[in-house]
Amino acid sequence: MLERDIERKVAAVAEDMGMYTDHIKATGKRGFPDRIFITKGGYIFFMEFKTTSGNLSARQKYVINKMESNNSDVSVVINVADGVALLKSKRDCVQLFDFKGL
């Protein structure tokens, strides 16, 4: 299965679960994860999609490391089942900080 097919199927499940999700098309920087997810509770996490034979580029590893060092939740997903399991584990997560008051 292609990366885009894995991504589409996982995104469809996320939307069925009531999450907001979008493909990240351009951030001005290469290596950014493929997709953002936001739970109903406002928790934000990211997924990078790969096939079982795919590898992260050096730039992707760098960006993911930087994001994680800033407490971002980033996962690499290699199949639909793992992506769906991750969605289920995040479904009830809530945002821990109220950004609306800033």
Image (cartoon, rainbow, N blue to C red):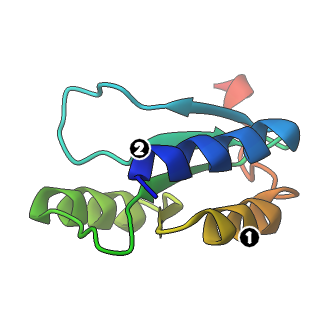
Relative image position of residue 82 (x, y in whole percent): 63, 72
- Residue 50 position, x and y percent, is 38, 62
Nearest the viewer among 27 and 72 is: 27
Give the residue pinned by disc 1: 85
Q: Where is residue 38 in the image (x, y as percent from the top left)?
A: 69, 40
Q: In the figure, residue 53 lies in which quadrant?
A: bottom left
Rendered residue at 29%/67% (across/down): 65
Q: Can residue 18 be seen in this view?
A: no
| In the image, residue 26 above or below residue 74 | above
Picture residue at 22% right of the left edge, 58% below the top: 60
**Do residues under tags 1 and 2 come within 8 Å of each other at their CB atoms?**
no
Query: What residue sits right under mark 2 in the picture?
Result: 34
Residue type at mark 2 is Asp
- Placement of 48 over or under 99, stated as above or below: below
Q: Quadrant of residue 67?
A: bottom left
| Label 1 secondary element | helix
- Across and down, in percent, residue 39 comes to 78, 44
Asked whether, in this view, residue 78 is left or right of residue 86, the answer is left
Would residue 51 be seen by someone viewing this image from the given angle? yes
Residue drawn where x is 73% and y is 59% of the image: 87
At 50% from the left and 54% from the top, the residue drawn is 47
Bin the neighbour count of mark 2 within 10 Å (Cα to Cα): few under 14, some 14-19, many 20 and up. Answer: some
Amino acid type indicated by mark 1: Ala
Image quadrant where one finds the C terminus? top right
